[in-house]
Image (cartoon, rainbow, N blue to C red):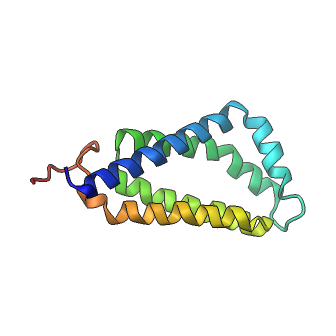
Amino acid sequence: MSKNVWISLLIRLMFGLIFFVFGLEKLIALTNTIEATGGMFDDTWMPRAIIGAFLYILPFIEITLGLSFLVGYKYRMMLVITGILLAILTFGLAVRGDYEMVSRNLVYFFILLIGLWHSDENRYCLGAPSIKD
C-alpha cells in the first residue's frame, strides 16, 4: 500500500471521527448548543435568527459528514463540502473576533487540502475505482 493511500485513509478517519463526535454532542444538547453558541454573536452585526438556523442544522451536517468520511462515501465531494463548511465557520469566528479559533480552522483546512491532493488514490472508499499497483 502506497503512502498516498495511507495519508488519504488517515485523513478520512480523522475527519470522520471529529465531525461525527462533535455533531453528535451538539445534537444531544441541541437547545443548549444553540443558546450558548448563538449568545456569542449577540455583540456582532450578524442576525440571531440566521445564527440560530445555522446552528440548528449544523449537527446534522457534521454527523452526515462524519459518517460519510468513516465509510468512505464520496470522499472527494465530502472534502469539498467540508471546505465550504470550514469557510462558513471561519467567517463566523472572524466576525466574532475569535482569531485563535480562526487559526485552528486554517490548520484543518490545510489538512483538508492534503486530503484533496491525495484523494485520487483512495482505494478504501465505497465506490472507489480499483487502482492497480
Q: Where is residue 17? Give x, y as percent.
A: 50, 40
The part of the image, by quadrant, that contains residue 117 is bottom left
- Report the residue at 78% width, 36% height from top: 31
Which residue appears farthest toward the left when viewing the image?
A: 132
* Residue sitting at x 55%, y 63%: 107
Horizontally, residue 116 falls left or right of residue 28, namely left
Residue plotted at (54% across, 44% down): 18
Q: Residue at x 50, y 56 (%)?
A: 82
Figure quadrant of residue 47: bottom right
| Horizontal side, residue 100 vs residue 79: left or right | right
Asked whether 45 or 37 is in front, the reply is 37
* Residue lying furthest right: 43
Q: Is residue 90 above or below residue 61?
A: below
Percent across and percent down for residue 102 are 67, 66
User: Is 84 rendered above or below residue 70?
Assistant: below
22, 11: nearer the viewer: 11
- x and y, in percent, of residue 90 in the image: 65, 64
Quadrant holding the C terminus: bottom left
In percent of width and height, residue 103 lies at: 64, 67
- Residue farthest top in this picture: 28
Q: Quadrant of residue 120?
A: bottom left
Looking at the image, residue 55 lies above or below residue 113: above
